[in-house]
Amino acid sequence: MLTTLSHYPPLVFAGECDVLRDRLAVASEGKAFVLQGGDCAETMAGVTGPNIRDRIKTILQMAVVLTYGAGMPVVKVGRMAGQFAKPRSSNDETRDGVTLPAYRGDMVNGFEFTAAARAHDPDRLLRAYHASSATLNLVRAFTDGGFADLRQVHLWNKGFLSGPAQARYETMANEIDRAMRFLEASGAGDGEALKRVEFYSSHEALVLDYERAMVRRDSRTGNPYNTSGHFIWIGERTRDLDGAHIDFASRVHNPIGVKLGPTTTRDDVMRLIDKLDPERVRGRLTFITRMGAQRSTKCSRNSSTRWAKTLITSRGSATRCTATPSPHPVATRLVGWMMSSKRSVASSTPTVRSAPGQVASTWN
């Protein structure tokens, strides 16, 4: 099965990963935002046209708010086309006296609480590949085929926002419309460029059998890339410096991320930098803090955790905000949370010349 997977075509290309690294380098200098959106874990059943379209629509909507409000480019990264595995703190789950293996995502086993569903099934890796391929095909069709056209900004809002949030978005959309009409009338607008956006895929590199099987050599340089996604990250539970996940990430040339919790020390951070980015290539390494706006402020001000300032200065800081489930969790509240989280980190680090350059967000 792994041999079969290793002979399948790449899902992404090395050149695309290199472009994303360059975009992240700009963000690390405070000249761009990074917006990451998607589910905590994808499901095979969720790989449908309407679901994928709505996720893209939400990210585009959030990105245009950030672009218009901040006046700088937004790097759009979907937490999709590969996020089929879940880290678990326990190997087992017990219900009513029955103990079965824990659900580890559709890439590994099924959610239903039965022995058959919870058995680990290697064929699911192939299903994850095909689901990721289908997702990326549709993403590319949407982002290159006119769906992402800025002149369609009103359409992205249908069925998403309501109440005061809808009114604010429509006001902004009207202003964008006027700006687009001015550009077209003056001949300054590039109609083709307005129809397309760069959109990158990302997921946690958790199931190493799958990730290793997706490594391909770049025909230009001979360097290895993990072609399962443009941007991969290592989670808080698997970022052991001597562990297999960090070792794998150190060997591929994708831009990579590492999640850091409030217990992370400055020494942890510096050792991770030395391991994963020894040549200090801008855009190569992103630290994703798992703290939220309130904890980011406390950690940055606490003298025992001054590593937060080091992250912002040396690499740019990515702040992860997770929304609670609601009918429209992202469109109604998450943009405000992202900006609040960014302000909290920036205000707590007055000695840093530039504010954090990246804002990463997810939703459930």
Image: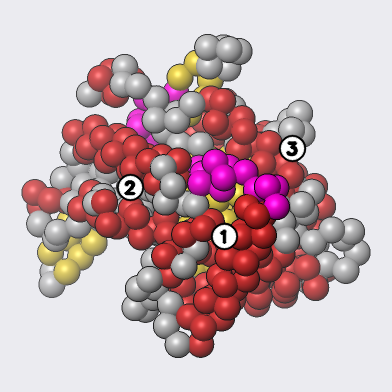
The residue lying at 56 percent from left, 32 percent from top is 17
Q: CA distance from mark 2 to mark 3?
A: 29 Å
Q: Which residue is mark 1?
A: 63
Q: Which residue is mark 2?
A: 84
Q: Is residue 177 shown in magenta?
A: no
The relative height of residue 274 versus residue 94 in the rendered view (above or below) is above
Disc 1 versus disc 2: nearer the observer? 1
Task: Point out residue 226 in the picture as x, y percentages from the top left corner.
Answer: 48, 29
Q: Residues within 10 Å of mark 2 (few under 14, many from 20)?
A: many
Task: Point out residue 309 in the picture as x, y percentages from the top left corner.
Answer: 80, 59
Q: CA distance from mark 1 to mark 3?
A: 23 Å
Q: Which residue is mark 3?
A: 282
The residue lying at 60 percent from left, 49 percent from top is 75
Task: Locate the N terminus and report the quarter of the image it occupies.
Answer: top left
SS state under label 3:
loop
Of callouts 1 and 3, which one flags the residue occurring earlier in the amino acid sequence?
1
The foreground one among 288 and 132 is: 132
The residue lying at 58 percent from left, 17 percent from top is 223
SS state under label 2:
loop
The foreground one among 49 and 188 is: 188
Q: Which residues, given as a range, are shown in magenta?
A: 186-215
Q: Is residue 211 shown in magenta?
A: yes
